[in-house]
């Protein structure tokens, strides 16, 4: 699906665009950008995907073909689990990255986010694009007087804005995705919890300050808050940070595959 002509390619330097530019070189595995390239190619608006869940089926079919190449067979549970986590990582990863690196929270509306799927190797998310200037920030943000800025009182309030914006997007995903897969709502919200917790943690790791990324995750998910299924599960084990997943990607059902170290089935 192509991006509608009404979604303009952004070139202007705005505060949130500058925030993304500063950290984009640290996200080697995924392109993170402000606006869309002139050649929009296979970029998808999140709102388009949620409005037409058949696009999830196409994504899962592509993943199924890759799994057959890798494992000799596919599984409906595995394709549902992988795509679930990958999609939620678009909003969760971007939110965590900008919160950690700039103490800014972008719009996470489905109409304000786009992504592209890798066309080689496995069909994972290869790019994330933010399409709007709007952001929330702290009182000491140097761009707090920008027309696109919404200033909040403190870090706790900023974390609350992030949660609310992320939950709104995740709720739209759950409503669109649930009818297409055999996964319960708790599993889908568990995956949403995982994507936000992991995204914030990895933001710290990518920016060279993993411990602060862990602290950020604890600030954003300090306790179990509906509809999230847990507080942050990050913990220090055997000299390194790890976490227990709330959801399952069902990798273990594939021939020759084992459960992930962080799988809720086996995690210490």
Image (cartoon, rainbow, N blue to C red):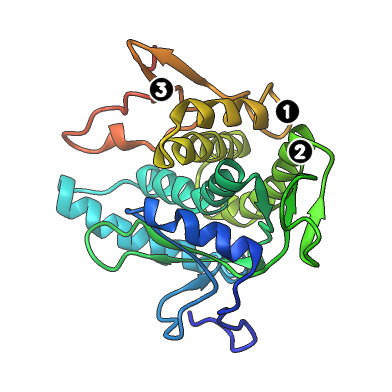
Disc 2 residue crowd, few under 14, some 14–19, many 20+, Cα 10 Å: some
Q: Are marks 2 and 3 in contact (CB under 8 Å)?
A: no
Query: Counting residues from the N terminus, which is met first, the one under dot 1 or under dot 2?
Result: 2
Disc 1 residue crowd, few under 14, some 14–19, many 20+, Cα 10 Å: few
Q: Secondary structure at mark 2?
A: helix
Using the image as rendered, state which of residue 245 and residue 20 is in the foreground.
20
Q: Residue furthest bottom?
A: 5
> Could you say where residue 147 lies in the image, as x and y percent from the top left?
80, 67
The answer, for residue 265, to whether it is visible in the render is: no
Q: Residue at x 56, y 43 (%)?
A: 96
> Could you say where residue 45 lies in the image, as x and y percent from the top left?
56, 71
For residue 65, side relative to residue 36 (left or right): left
Q: Secondary structure at mark 3?
A: strand
Q: Residue at x 24, y 38 (%)?
A: 254
Residue 160, labelled with which disc?
Answer: 2
Disc 3 residue crowd, few under 14, some 14–19, many 20+, Cα 10 Å: some
Q: Residue at x 57, y 25 (%)?
A: 215
For residue 117, side relative to residue 111 (left or right): left
Q: Which residue is mark 1?
A: 225
Residue 163 image-quadrant placement: top right
> Marks 2/3: CA distance?
24 Å
> Marks 1/3: CA distance?
21 Å
Q: Which numbered mark, 1 or 2, is in the foreground of this view?
A: 2
Q: Are marks 1 and 2 in contact (CB under 8 Å)?
A: no
Query: Counting residues from the N terminus, which is met first, the one under dot 1 or under dot 3?
Result: 1
- 265, above or below 108, in the image: above
Q: Which residue is mark 3?
A: 242
Q: Residue at x 50, y 48 (%)?
A: 89
């Amino acid at each position: 699906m192509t991006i509608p002509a009404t979604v303009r390619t952004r070139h202007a330097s705005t505060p949130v665009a500058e925030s993304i530019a500063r950290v984009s070189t640290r996200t080697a595995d995924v392109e993170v950008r402000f606006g869309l390239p002139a050649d929009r190619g296979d970029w998808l608006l999140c709102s388009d995907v949620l409005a037409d869940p058949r696009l999830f089926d196409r994504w899962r079919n592509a993943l199924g073909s890759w799994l057959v190449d890798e494992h000799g067979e596919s599984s409906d549970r595995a394709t549902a689990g992988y795509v679930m986590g990958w999609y939620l990582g678009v909003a969760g990863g971007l939110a965590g990255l900008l919160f950690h690196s700039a103490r800014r929270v972008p719009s996470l509306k489905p109409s304000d986010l786009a992504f592209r799927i890798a066309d080689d190797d496995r069909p994972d998310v290869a790019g994330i694009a933010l399409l709007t200037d709007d952001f929330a920030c702290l009182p000491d943000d140097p761009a707090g007087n920008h027309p696109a800025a919404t200033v909040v009182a403190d870090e706790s309030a900023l974390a609350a804005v992030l949660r609310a914006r992320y939950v709104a997007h995740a709720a739209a995903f759950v409503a669109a995705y649930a009818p297409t897969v055999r996964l319960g709502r708790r599993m889908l919200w568990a995956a949403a919890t995982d994507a936000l917790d992991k995204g914030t943690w990895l933001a710290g790791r990518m920016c060279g300050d993993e411990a602060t990324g862990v602290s950020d995750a604890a600030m954003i998910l300090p306790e179990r808050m509906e509809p999230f299924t847990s507080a942050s599960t990050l913990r220090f084990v055997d000299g390194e940070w790890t976490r227990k997943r709330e959801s399952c990607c069902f990798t273990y059902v594939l021939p020759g595959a084992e459960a992930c170290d962080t799988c809720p089935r086996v995690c210490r």
